[in-house]
Image: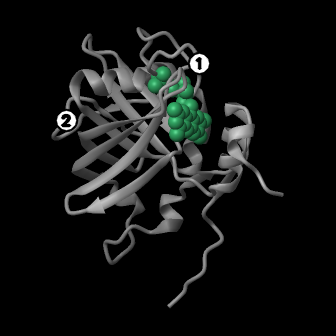
Amino acid sequence: MDIDPATLTVGRVYQVMISIITPRPIAWVSTISPAGVCNVAPFSYFTGVGSQPPSLMISVVNKPDGTPKDTLRNIQANGEFVVNIVSHSLSQAMIETSREYPYEVNEMDLAGLHPQPSRCVQPPGIAESPVQLECRVMQIVRIGDGLLATHAVFGQIVWMRIADRVLNEAGEVDPQLLDTIGRLGGKTYTRTRDRFELW
Ligand SMILES: Cc1cc2nc3c(=O)[nH]c(=O)nc-3n(C[C@H](O)[C@H](O)[C@H](O)COP(=O)(O)O)c2cc1C
């Protein structure tokens, strides 16, 4: 099958892309509004970018009406966010936070999650998550012009908190204990239990 993406609807391009670019890690992003309301949402257009400085990128598409999602609104307001890592046991809570709620709703409370005070940034992390990456915005790059424009948010990781419970005896992160999930196409997710090594 050959596809000229220019002939597809935006929705179809999205479906095809998320079914091909797999598995995608999930940044579970916590932010805070100027009024102090915590927001939490997952983003799977997410990747590490560099190590010096330690940096990552999340991609936040506008809502269909062209307005920014709450996550982007908060990041634009104060330049800070926390990326929390999603273990399998947190899947259901993660999905709860992917639904659209009014800006004034505290999604940390709503999903039964607890704030973990951050060391270097204002937004709290998610205490239930095994990893919090505290980030300060480096750049926000707007991609596209229409209502569904995307914002690639580049953040510098200024603090990493990794729970001892996911470390092995050597002090390294143990993938089995971290037990991350990844997103595939549609509603399908994957676990990280089937591993192999290459040299
Ligand atoms: C696993 C998963 C991954 C997602 N990835 C993205 C993404 O990369 N970019 C995006 O804009 N929305 C993504 N979404 C949708 C947002 O999480 C959703 O729009 C959410 O309501 C945004 O919340 P906010 O308005 O509080 O920021 C994803 C949803 C799920 C369940």
Q: Which residue is mark 1?
A: 64
Left or right: 109, with 53 as reference point: right
Picture quarter with ligand 1: top right
Q: Secondary structure at mark 2?
A: loop
Left or right: 22, with 132 as reference point: right
- Residue at the extreme left of the image, as rendered: 120
Give residue 121's mark: 2
Q: Residue at position x 47%, y 27% from top?
A: 145
Quarter of the view holding residue 12: top right
Q: Residue at position x 49%, y 28% from top?
A: 149
Q: Residue at position x 79%, y 56% from top?
A: 2
Q: Relative to the observer, which residue lies in front, 113 or 10? A: 10
Residue 159 in percent (x, y) is at: 21, 49
**Quarter of the image that includes the N terminus:** bottom right
Q: Relative to the observer, which residue lies in front, 54 or 122? A: 54
Q: Relative to the observer, which residue lies in front, 3 or 33? A: 3
Give residue 26's mark: none
Q: Hey, what amino acid is under mark 1?
A: Pro
Q: Hey, what amino acid is under mark 2?
A: Val
- Asked if the residue under mark 1 is in contact with the one under mark 2, i.e. CB atoms within 8 Å, the reply is no
Residue 26 in percent (x, y) is at: 51, 47
Can residue 94 be seen here? no
